Amino acid sequence: MRAIGIDVGGTFVDFVLHDTEAGTSRVLKVSSGLDPAETVVAGVEEICRLAAIDPSGVDLLVHGTTIATNALLEYDGARTGVITTRGFRDVLHIGRHQRPQNYSIQQDIPWQARPLAQRRHRLPVTERLAPPEGKVVVPLDESEVRAAASELAQEGIEAVAVCFLFSYLNPAHEQTAAQVVREVLPNAYVCTSNEVAPQFREFERFTTTAVNAFVGPRVRAYVTRLSERLEAAGVGGGLHLMQSNGGTATAEQALARPVTLLLSGPVGGVIGGLWSIGRNHRQRYVATLDVGGTSADIGIVTEAGLVEARARETWIAGYPVLVPMIDIETIGAGGGSIAYVDAAGAPHVGPRSAGAVPGPAAYGLGGQEPTVTDANVVLGRLPASLAGGLELDVDAARRAVQTFADALGTSLADAAAGIIDIVNENMAAAFRVKTIERGLDPRSFLLCAFGGAGPLQAAELARLLGIREIVIPPNPGVTSAAGLLASDLRYDVVRSMLRRLDEVDTTALQAAFEEYDRELTALLALDGCAPEEIDVIWATDLRYRGQGYELTIPLDARALDGATLSRLRAAFDAEHRAEFGHDFPDYDAELVNLRVTAVGKVAGLDRVPVSGGALDDARTGEVAVSFRSDGALATCVSAVYDRELLPVGMLVSGPAIVTQVDSTTLVPPDATCERDQLGNLWIRLTRNPS
């Protein structure tokens, strides 16, 4: 099978073409263009040309896209309307009592400052359902729905979210209303909360559905255009999109719930990092660091596997989103992050980025503001001539960083080192959120660093966190794209079923799980997965009665009875104790949500052993590099090596710089570097941070 992974970042678009029959891979990195679809198609054509294959011979395209993410982050989605239960028009505005900053009178409340649907576009209609079974108390007035849809049509609405109270118990009213809206607005994107997030808590359910509507037309337009352009270019194979849950979906399924694509971009990196180190991740904790041109994405993997975000913490751009997603922290810290001094004289780095155009000053494309890349050039950590023939403009980088130095009243070298220190501290703070604040010791982690800028920052970041071992994947600049090819198809159902655990009807529970199991298995079968390629996981969300949050606990059996529920309760108590340091075994427990996850295995990405060469051949020169030693800057002569020629198993002592086409790796003093049989670089630090 020939498959292409495509990861679109803020600065570059990365491609990996893997041919399972030939056992070969080809990588390509191009600058992001103004038209993402055109950039993707041009890149696919180019990588096929480099691999000497016809585009029609491609079997699968797996795409990590930032279209949905950017639409939400930049508040550039569709003109959205909401039709809701009378009396609940302002649920999206009121939210909950929690605020980002509870005691600030100047705080920014995203759902109020940047409403997904303006109040005049949130229209109430007469209807009412009642818990616990979703009984119809007040029938739906279809004439009011039609009138509301007509009013939204006159307002130029592009997308409509239908959100009724208690619809997670009974979808009938929402389904009828959606059908009426589609008749009045045949070209609009229409979705219901029961389809998108059939869970209790109306603010979160309504918001998730509104986000889905807000990004839906943008995603639909992009995927449609991309599919048409790929077809016109004669590219074969189906198109899969990476989801926030760490699995892929066919384009058709992704378009039904584009809200699942909000972390489509960064998730591939976590999977790619684990794929690159093979079985090692099963034996230790792993932290992944993906530093590109614009941002840094941080993921955590424990002995249990990929860490999924807790349901109460799945927020994107300040909006709660009720969809399964891998727990990733993203901050504005990349190679293109711009350094500046604020009005109070304090230095900052990011989140604003120079992007691909004009890019860092060192790229010679007109950039003039100092960036992290420019600081690395000034410190000698990026040689003027890089692998792949890229020439850096050292003088331009020095001029840019000098403006930062002048603003601070310090030397050029100290200013450059300060930029690196700030960006590393920003990343370290994000790591601490994911580890220390959750009771995990970062010193027990292996750091897997990739992205174009990750290997340059990894060693100094590891010192800040007390991490002693770092692994750099074979092609760090395209690791996220490789992770897309290492991902399986995955679909989820999460549906509320509020019951006291000791009052649950196991027959009804069994029937519900089996229904969702069949539904997801059928989807994977339509995608071409054979029964033996499908794994299905059943789980529950539980809480103590009176709590406002849940923990996800997997079921250990498919035949549900009283004994199964007893074991489930014991597992919940144990997980609560592990998570929060205490449990309440005498309190009543409540079942909140049912979760079913179906995974369809896809032919994976093979790891190809490398041969390497002789150390003397790998050494291409030496440069003067500045490092901090006991708080002061010191310049060391550092050897420069070509990664492709490094021998396998031989230790290289720092300071050293390892170059390759898609990234540069920094090995500081008091560290060693070794290339393993899979082409990974293992950096081991020999002393604690100074």
Image (cartoon, rainbow, N blue to C red):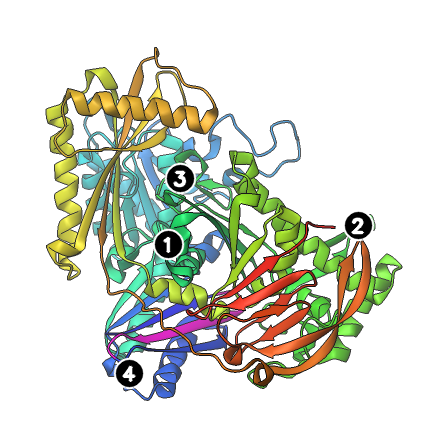
Q: Please, what secondary structure does the residue beneath circle 1 have?
A: helix
Q: Would you place residue 407 above or below residue 521 in this image?
A: below
- The residue to which callout 3 is attached is 207
Q: Which is in the foreground here, disc 4 or disc 1?
A: 4
Residue 55 marker: 4
Tell me residue 149's x, y (percent): 29, 45
Residue drawn at 35 percent across, 54 percent down: 243
Q: Please, what secondary structure does the residue beneath circle 4 have?
A: helix
The kind of secondary structure the magenta stretch mainly shows is: strand
The tag earlier along the polypeptide, 2 or 3, is 3
Residue drawn at 50 percent across, 82 percent down: 613
Amino acid type of the residue that numbered disc 1 sits on in the rendered structure:
Leu
Q: CA distance from mark 4 to mark 2?
A: 52 Å
Indicate left or right for 46 with 618 as reference: left
Indicate left or right for 364 with 676 as reference: right
Closest to the observer, 498 or 79: 498
Amino acid type of the residue that numbered disc 2 sits on in the rendered structure:
Ala
Q: CA distance from mark 4 to mark 3?
A: 41 Å
Magenta residues, as a range?
9-21
The tag earlier along the polypeptide, 4 or 1, is 4
Magenta stretch contains residue 11? yes
Q: Which is in the foreground here, disc 4 or disc 3?
A: 4
Q: Would you place residue 21 above or below residue 93 in this image?
A: below
- The residue to which callout 1 is attached is 261
- The residue to which callout 2 is attached is 346
Amino acid type of the residue that numbered disc 3 sits on in the rendered structure:
Thr
Residue drawn at 30 percent across, 22 percent down: 570
Splitting the image into 4 quarters, where does residue 336 fall? bottom right
Q: Are marks 2 and 1 in contact (CB under 8 Å)?
A: no
